[in-house]
Amino acid sequence: MNLGSRSEVKALIKSGRILVNKERVLRPDLKVDEESVVISYQGREYRYRPFVYYMMNKPAGVLCATRDSSCRTVLSLFMEQCGPANGGELSGIPVQDIFPVGRLDKDTVGLLLLTNDGELAHRLLSPRFHVPKTYYVETDFPLPAEKAAALEAGVDIGDKEPTRKAVVTPLADLSCTITITEGRFHQVKRMFQTQGLTVTYLKRLSMGGLALDPGLSEGQIRELTKEEVDLLWQKTC
Ligand code: URA
């Protein structure tokens, strides 16, 4: 939990400066319930959390990768805002354990989840679970009803299988939302291409039960609430 090395923490405990559930302890080998224990040191409370969950409103121009030699990545953005050097509260979790859940193209904006919870990431990304993702889409030309219907029924984007059923909701002449339950490479852009349309702007609005916080401006990151994490585990399809 970033308090110090094992031997430094032992020394702190032996010196009587650590409280466990508000009681002074002197034995470093004391067994505690890691789920509920509250450790205090110098008036500050430390709670152990094995996993952390953050929502980013990904800006355009940032790569969905952990590392890149030439381009800014979502992980470098995360470090700038939430890393321990910036007062980020990672509960001692190594920043290198944190990864983006799935990929958004460099020019795509919107909801991106960052976590160190591999099981949840698998639940959200595995093709077995068909987790819905909704995108706001702008196109170069209007999307007529028959083309929207084709996208909804599933289209051949050059993969082995056509795309699964989708839901398209027209908003204005050049904008709509689309909900898909897969996560193929450039999927939304390729789907619209089959209808002769180019996606000019793409923003992810939601993933499973989790919606992008409208108060989060592009480039901003915040931790998920417990309720939001629970929403991500809920069965959606
Ligand atoms: N579909 C795309 O084409 N690009 C994205 O970034 C996400 C979905």
Image (cartoon, rainbow, N blue to C red):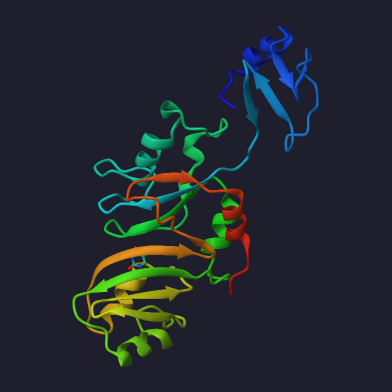
- Residue at 80% in and 22% down: 30
Q: Position of residue 43 (x, y in %)?
A: 63, 18
- Residue 142 is at least partly visible in this image: yes
Residue shown at the point (28%, 83%) measured from the top left: 194
Give the side of residue 227 with respect to residue 104, left or right. Answer: right
In front here: 101 or 68?
Answer: 101
Image point (54%, 64%), residue name: 209
Q: Residue furthest left?
A: 140
Residue 207 image offset from top left, x and y in percent: 48, 63
Foreground: 160 or 44? 44
Q: Residue at x 78, y 34 (%)?
A: 33
Say which quadrant the C terminus sits in.
bottom right
Residue 154 at least partly seen = no
The quadrant of the picture occupied by the N terminus is: top right
Can you say whether 26 is above or below 45 in the image? above
Where residue 221 appears, as percent x and y from the top left, is: 41, 45
Which of the 4 image quadrants contains residue 235?
A: bottom right
Does residue 132 appear to the left or right of 33 in the view shown? left
Apparent side of residue 217 relative to residue 131 in the rendered image (left or right) = left
* Residue 200 against residue 8 in the figure, above or below: below
Seen in the picture, residue 190 relative to 87 is either above or below; the reply is: below
